[in-house]
Image (cartoon, rainbow, N blue to C red):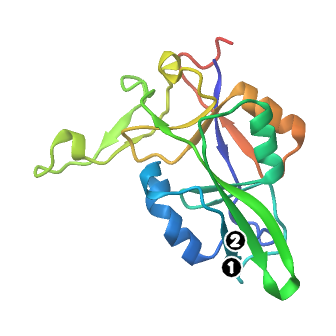
Amino acid sequence: MKYYVMYAETAVEEYFKPNDMLKDELEKGCLNSEFQYLDHKPVESEVSEDGGLEFPDFVTAGCIPFISDKFKRLLDELQVDNLFYKPIEFTFSLFGTKEYYYLALPPRINCLNWDESGVQTEDNEFLAPTELMREAEDIVINEYAVGNYKIFKLANVTNQEIIVTKEIKTAVETANLENVYFAELKGENNGNS
């Protein structure tokens, strides 16, 4: 199975930016996919004044992924049922603009091939090994641990990459969604199908 990192360009001046208050509200739950700190209640949020007026299909603010209504409909058609969704209405009152988005947070699953992924661990004699900050430099996925998930993040590491299957990548590219990019993961089991 081939896997890809899905990402958005964040330094495009024309794209809107979520405001800092919304980012602060969502960051705790999004950093480690801790859904217990989030709810499904719709939110209305004014966009940041230092962003643009274009609303692409995918925007990230640090560890927080936002998708357009069009992107969500595509994921629903693909029967992606493991994401945490929170409706968000972004407004720009000065121009009377409203756009509907979703926080679309993937779960973290334990599917990293630890032997092949080059995991870097900080040194700290006062912390237990499970408490140390770890980051995978070369991500190799154990596809048997992925199960039926088509979009996910990695558990037990600090990595923020959103990983998708080839099916998702192909569907997104076919739909011509704006500001959604992919980088293929290299690895032992990334190419069999």
**Dot 1 or dot 2, earlier in sequence:** 2
Quarter of the C terminus within the rendering: top right
Residue 52 screen position, x and y as percent: 79, 75
Q: In the displayed structure, does residue 15 sit left or right of residue 65? A: right
Given the image, on which type of amino acid does mark 2 rest? Answer: Lys
Q: Residue at x 50, y 25 (%)?
A: 141
Residue 190 screen position, x and y as percent: 60, 20
Please name whichever residue, 77 or 48, is drawn nearer the observer in this view of the structure: 77
Name of the residue lying farthest toward the bottom = 94
Residue 145 screen position, x and y as percent: 47, 20
Q: Residue at x 41, y 47 (%)?
A: 158
- Give SS at disc 1: loop
Q: Residue at x 56, y 42 (%)?
A: 106
Name the image quarter holding residue 102. bottom right
Q: Residue at x 77, y 76 (%)?
A: 91
Given the image, on which type of amino acid does mark 1 rest? Answer: Ser
Q: In the displayed structure, does residue 136 sit left or right of residue 66? A: left
- Give SS at disc 2: loop
Name the image quarter holding residue 192. top right
Q: Which residue is mark 1?
A: 48
3D distance between C-alphas at marks 1 and 2:
5 Å
Quarter of the N terminus within the rendering: top right
Name of the residue lying farthest toward the front = 41
Name of the residue lying farthest toward the left = 126
